[in-house]
């Protein structure tokens, strides 16, 4: 028992001397709890609605104005025709598209059931089903209010016939939404964690100092250290995508070349961040906890489980510096919506900028290490 107590006391002393590890163990989980508790919720909020008004009457305007007046929907772009409305949905500019056809007010006042078109991005099955239900209820309520005000209280309330189309996932199968997210998560873990741990291991063994005094430049060292893990992550991604296609029947509606561009840009980010974490850590424990902290943060704020639009405004700003959010959009966009290069240009350029920054930071960090050696 005495020997055990001595060993425990020694471990606590060693932990107390490792201030970097103490910060990771105690401070970062509290930070995660504070941020994620506010950011993660399954309530339906900030659903972006694109509109097309082909009726251009008082009732059609009242119906479309009722969406942003609710707590659930926020106004999105206004389309000029049906093709533009569908393009907005495919590009991810809105979550739900409402089309009021010509004759909507006439049918409502005549006591007939007017039709209302609702197209929903079905990739997120949870949001799609509930969003379509709320949208239909709002349209019905406004039509009945309008008919009562203009045709008299005694008039029969019209019943709005909503024609709902769930695009990209007609059966609202949740696995089609989750499987691409799991693939993104696997690639992130393999590339970031493996890179960070490999470099720190060399620090612990003392071989890093020996490498840094060789004629190798920091750029050559960084590229040589990350290239094998990049190729492994690429191979794993290919394997996982094939498995998803053949086993889970996840479609590939877009171009695989666009997906490959997204993967390469994303690997530049994750490998660079893994190296930065290793440069800031002296032990494998520190590196593992640092990468783990950012991984949990990135996964929860990427839209993997919860829609980004549901989060508070400050949390949505945080997601803009989260590279996984952009790659999640690229993977789901290419696989499920058939999004092309033009639709995903913003995400690709953002990832490329982040990758150059992260990789450049890693090269500078190792240049400082080399100067100290």
Image (cartoon, rainbow, N blue to C red):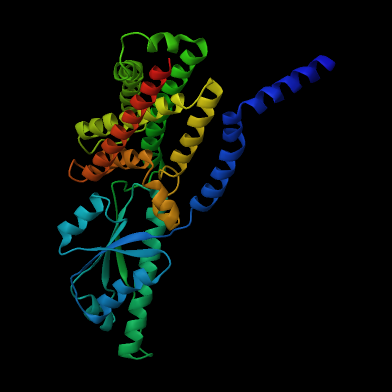
Q: Is residue 205 left or right of residue 258?
A: right
Above or below, comparing residue 205 to residue 248 in the picture = above
Residue at 17 percent across and 44 percent down: it is 342
Left or right side of 152 for 87? left
Most extreme residue toward the right, as rendered? 2
Q: Is residue 6 visible?
A: yes
Given residues 349 and 254, the one toward you in this image is: 349
Image quadrant in which you'd find residue 233: top left
Direction from residue 2 to residue 231 in the image, left or right: left
Quarter of the rendering occupied by the C terminus: top left
Residue 19 x %, y %: 60, 30
Q: How many marks?
A: 0
Is residue 41 shown to the viewer in this render? no
Q: Is residue 51 above or below residue 172?
A: below
The spot of residue 324 in percent (x, y) is: 37, 38
Q: In x, y percent, where is residue 293?
A: 51, 35
Foreground of the two, 328 or 334: 328
Q: Nearer the viewer, residue 197 or 126?
A: 197
Question: Toward which corner of the image does residue 24 lie, by quadrant?
Answer: top right
Query: Quadrant location of the N terminus?
Result: top right
The image position of residue 269, as x and y in percent, is 34, 32
């Amino acid at each position: 028992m005495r020997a055990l107590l001595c060993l425990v006391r020694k471990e606590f002393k060693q932990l107390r001397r490792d201030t970097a590890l103490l910060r990771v163990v105690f401070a970062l989980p509290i930070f995660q709890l504070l941020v994620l508790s506010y950011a993660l919720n399954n309530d339906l909020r900030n659903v972006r609605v694109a509109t097309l008004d082909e009726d251009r009457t008082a009732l059609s305007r009242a119906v479309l104005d009722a969406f942003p007046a609710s707590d659930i929907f926020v106004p999105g772009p206004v389309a000029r025709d049906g093709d533009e409305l569908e393009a907005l949905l495919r590009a991810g500019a809105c979550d739900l598209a409402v089309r009021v056809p010509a004759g909507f007010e006439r049918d409502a006042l005549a006591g007939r059931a007017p039709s209302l078109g609702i197209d929903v991005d079905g990739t997120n099955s949870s949001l799609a089903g509930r969003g379509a239900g709320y949208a239909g209820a709002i349209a019905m309520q406004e039509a009945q209010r309008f008919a009562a005000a203009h045709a008299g209280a005694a008039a029969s309330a019209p019943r709005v016939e909503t024609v709902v189309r769930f695009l990209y996932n007609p059966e609202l199968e949740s696995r089609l939404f989750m499987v691409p997210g799991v693939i993104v998560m696997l690639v992130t873990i393999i590339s970031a964690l493996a890179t960070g741990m490999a470099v720190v291991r060399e620090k612990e063994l003392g071989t890093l100092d020996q490498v840094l005094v060789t004629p190798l430049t920091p750029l050559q060292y960084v590229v040589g250290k990350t290239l094998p893990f990049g190729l492994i992550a690429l191979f794993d991604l290919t394997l996982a995508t094939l498995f998803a296609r053949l086993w889970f029947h996840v479609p590939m509606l877009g171009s695989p070349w666009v997906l490959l561009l997204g993967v390469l840009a994303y690997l530049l980010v994750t490998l660079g961040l893994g190296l930065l974490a290793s440069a800031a850590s002296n032990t494998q424990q520190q590196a593992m906890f640092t990468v783990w902290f950012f991984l949990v943060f990135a996964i929860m704020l990427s839209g993997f489980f919860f829609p980004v639009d549901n989060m508070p405004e400050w949390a949505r700003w945080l997601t803009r510096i989260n590279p996984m959010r952009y790659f999640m959009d690229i993977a789901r966009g290419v696989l499920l919506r058939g999004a092309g290069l033009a639709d995903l240009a913003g995400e690709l350029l953002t990832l490329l900028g982040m990758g150059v920054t992260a990789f450049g930071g890693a090269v500078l960090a190792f240049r400082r290490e080399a100067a100290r050696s």
